[in-house]
Image (cartoon, rainbow, N blue to C red):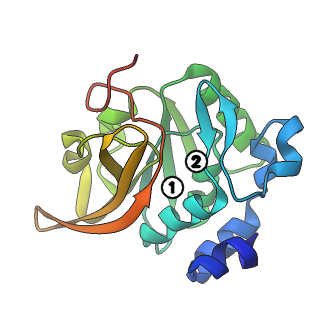
Amino acid sequence: MVDTQLRARGICDPRVLAAMLAVPREEFVDEALRDDAYGDWPLPIGGGQTISQPYTVAFMAEAAELRGDEKVLEVGTGSGYGAAVLSQLGAVVHTIERIPALARRALSTLARLRFSNVHVHLGDGSLGLVEESPFDVIVVTAGAASLPPSYTDQLAEGGRIVMPIGKCKSSQHLYRFRNQHGALSIDDLGTFAFVPLIGDEGWRAT
């Protein structure tokens, strides 16, 4: 996976590559899908959600530019795989999921695999997690039509937000925002497809 899917497609941060090697992806998918765990495609995890393909997880982790001392918020826990990868790169990861069954399963998996610096929360991820803010990095694994104000309010000076944004629920551009003295700079990182961010500052549930 690391050579054929990640290095071959431009992922070059050695810490990200090491994190992708360290986290056993097969532990985060249903047993019936384990043979496909390292394929270059997303997999269903229930609740209409997916575990992103390895390249997408690695790309977002690299875009976050983690050094190892950051407090991270991940929005959209899903299976817990992305949070596990981020836990290898940052000091502490808070991850929030709106679907109770997914949050419970992710918590169980992360605890079983002893990812002790990951904390799972249940709630509306579009609102961030104000009680644990500010965050050095916010990684959002679902797309919205615009950047939720709560994220900028909860971002530390010098912090980064990596998030897909687009007017279409099924296709977005991935952006990196940097907080520089209260102003945001923006990098467009290309086209991706994510599930919609559902919540008060995202899309409405249908």
Expressed as whole percent of the image width and height from the top left, the position of residue 137 reads 37, 59
Specify which label sits upstream in the sequence, 2 or 1: 1
Q: For the view shown, which residue lies furthest in the left direction?
A: 182
Q: Nearer the viewer, residue 148 or 93?
A: 148
Q: Which residue is mark 2?
A: 118
Residue 81 visible (yes or no): yes
Position above or below: 77 against 100: below
In the rendered view, does 44 fall on the left or right side of 31?
left
Q: Can you identify the residue that label 1 sits on?
A: 92
- Name which residue type carries label 1: Val
In which image quadrant can residue 108 be found?
Answer: top right
Q: Is residue 60 above or below residue 102?
A: below
**Position of 150 compared to 57: left or right?**
left
- Assign a secondary structure to mark 1: strand
Q: In the image as oriented, which residue stretches furthest toward the top?
A: 206
Question: Marks 2/1: CA distance?
Answer: 6 Å
**Is residue 90 in sight in this rendering?**
no
The residue located at (33%, 40%) in the rendering is: 168
Is the residue under label 1 in contact with that under label 2 (CB below 8 Å)?
Answer: yes
The image quadrant where one finds the C terminus is top left
Q: Residue 89 in the image: state x and y as whole percent.
A: 55, 67
Of 171 and 144, which appears nearest the observer? 171
Q: Secondary structure at mark 2?
A: strand
The residue under label 2 is which amino acid type?
Val
The quadrant where residue 103 appears: top right
**Residue located 43% across and 69% down the image:** 63
Left or right: residue 8 versus residue 90 is right
| Residue shown at the point (81%, 35%) measured from the top left | 30
* Image location of residue 193, percent across then percent down: 47, 49
Labelled disc at residue 71:
none
